[in-house]
Image: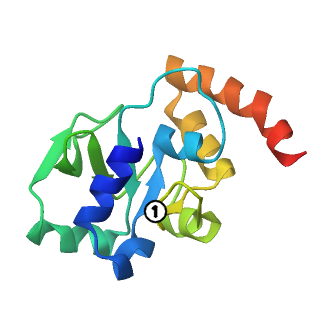
Amino acid sequence: MDDLIRLLASLIENDQRNNYILFGSAAIALRGIDLDRPINDLDVFVSQDTFEGLSKKFKLEEKPGNDGPAVPFYKPAENIEIWKSFPGVTFSDVAKNSSPTTASAGFPVGGLDDLRSWKAAQGREKDRADLEMIDKQRGALAG
């Protein structure tokens, strides 16, 4: 994961890092939760404005949505995806609750409550397992 963060940092100027929030399972790991599985990708959450501005830098791609139309994203490098939305959370709320961690190269990292809300909204089998790991370990992190 460190390599992916370094790669992302090489693509994003230092003064722009606050516009890119590390999210997804990698962010859960950056918050100190061991999901007991390898994390091989990096999801990045950006505002609508930032997302639109990225059309000059990266090719727009799409993935099938869980329960609807295809979802657009950018893939600036292998295993890095930039999204303008995540189920169960809004960018503005995530931005308020995010902050850098020692391993995030200055990028803000989504807060554990928002990451938990996203996992709950996803509802996939791996997300249910991740929720159990978050709930089991977050008390130890607070104490």
Please state the total of marks drawn on the protein image. Answer: 1
Choose top left, top right, bottom left or bottom right for residue 97.
bottom right
* Disc 1 element: loop
In this rendering, the answer to whether 137 lies above or below 43 is above
Choose top left, top right, bottom left or bottom right for residue 29.
top right
The way the protein has been coloured in the rendering is rainbow
In this rendering, the answer to whether 2 lies above or below 65 is below
Residue at 60%, 22% (x, y): give it. Answer: 128
Mark 1 Cα shell of 10 Å, populated few (<14), some (14-19), many (≥20): some
In the depicted view, which residue is nearer to us: 76 or 6? 6
Residue with the mark numbered 1:
105
- Residue 141 in picture, x, y percent from top left: 80, 43
Left/right placement of residue 40 relative to residue 76 reads: right
Query: Which residue ends up furthest to the right in the rendered image?
Result: 143
Choose top left, top right, bottom left or bottom right for residue 10.
bottom left
Query: Which residue ends up furthest to the bottom in the rendered image?
Result: 15
Left/right placement of residue 73 relative to residue 31 reads: left
- Residue 84 in picture, x, y percent from top left: 34, 59
In the depicted view, which residue is nearer to us: 81 or 67? 81
Q: Quadrant of the C terminus?
A: top right
Residue at 59%, 58% (x, y): give it. Answer: 102
Residue at 24%, 40% (x, y): give it. Answer: 69
Q: Quadrant of the N terminus?
A: top left
In the depicted view, which residue is nearer to us: 58 or 47? 58
- Residue 111 in picture, x, y percent from top left: 63, 55
Residue at 57%, 46% (x, y): give it. Answer: 30
Left/right placement of residue 34 relative to residue 47 reads: right
Q: Check disc 1 and give the amino acid type.
A: Ala
